[in-house]
Amino acid sequence: MSLRKLDIFSDLASGFEAGINPYRDLLAASHELPLLSGEALRGKKGAWRQFAAQQHPAFHLDTSPLLLEIGCHNGGILREFAKTLPEGACLGIDITFKRAVKTAQKASESQLSNMWSILGNAAQLSELVAPQELDGIVAFFPDPWNQKRHQKKNRLFSYSFCQDLYKTLRVGGFFWMKTDDEEYHQEVEEALREAGGRKSSLTEPFLQQKQRYTSIFERKFLKQKLPIYESFWLKLP
């Protein structure tokens, strides 16, 4: 069974046999990790800011940034965002038990009360996040390279997904993408341009430090001297 085929609000762990995937078992057994899945996600659409304010006292409903990383992998990049933005709230979504659990473990080990992991298929983003709810979306190297050559039709960032993604951003919000695939990057750029986005430099107040936020994928490609395609988009009034 694939998580891609399951409803994001279903009990994902119950659909898989215990004892086969240790991360599935960790998810089923632990209620202490900052990890949301299944029923815990129901009702969060349109209420993520309220959730963050309840869990993280430094988060201010009107002024603190709410970020989402799509494909948070093992949580390294999301942890850096959470450290950089102590007053903000950082959500990360991934489709595998291992990555979702590892991301939550990083938040717990680092004692970051502003970082949460979500287990689920980001393709269902419109069911999880309301229009104009997010201040920023990050997607660094979505759809790992070993899948892209063989599963181009299954790429997450389709034209329709990019349109839905753009709707979830507040006015002034941003979408930041990095990928090693030039064609993929061009397709996403075209979709965002048609949605009304404007390509820009990193000028958001809470990202003025302009850290590189270098993921394990980026380090790998840089070591191999492969090109990396990066763009930063703003949502204008």
Image (tube, rainbow, N blue to C red):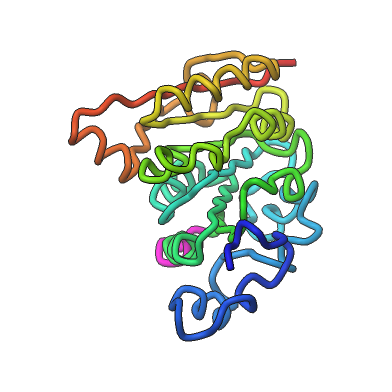
Residue 222 is drawn in which quadrant? Answer: top left
Q: Residue at x 57, y 57 (%)?
A: 116
Residue 56 in picture, x, y percent from top left:
62, 56
Q: Is residue 79 above or below residue 184?
A: below
Side (left or right) of 153 relative to 81:
right
> Could you say where residue 217 lies in the image, as x and y percent from the top left?
32, 42
At x 25% / y 41%, what residue is drawn?
220
Residue located farthest toward the bottom when viewing the structure as drawn: 19
Residue lying furthest front: 150
Part of the protein shown in magenta: 107-112
Based on the displayed image, in which of its 4 quarters is residue 22 positioned?
bottom left
Give the percent coordinates (x, y) of residue 130. 78, 42
How many marks the image carries: the answer is 0
Vertical relation: 59 (above or below) 183? below
Q: Is residue 49 magenta?
A: no
The residue shown at (64%, 55%) is 57
x then y, percent, for residue 43: 81, 58
Quadrant of the image containing the C terminus: top right
Q: Residue at x 73, y 45 (%)?
A: 129
Looking at this view, is 81 or 161 the one in front? 161
Is residue 93 rendered to the left or right of residue 141?
right
Which of the 4 image quarters holds residue 158? Answer: top right
Q: Quadrant of the N terminus?
A: bottom right
Lateral position of residue 121 relative to residue 105, left or right: right
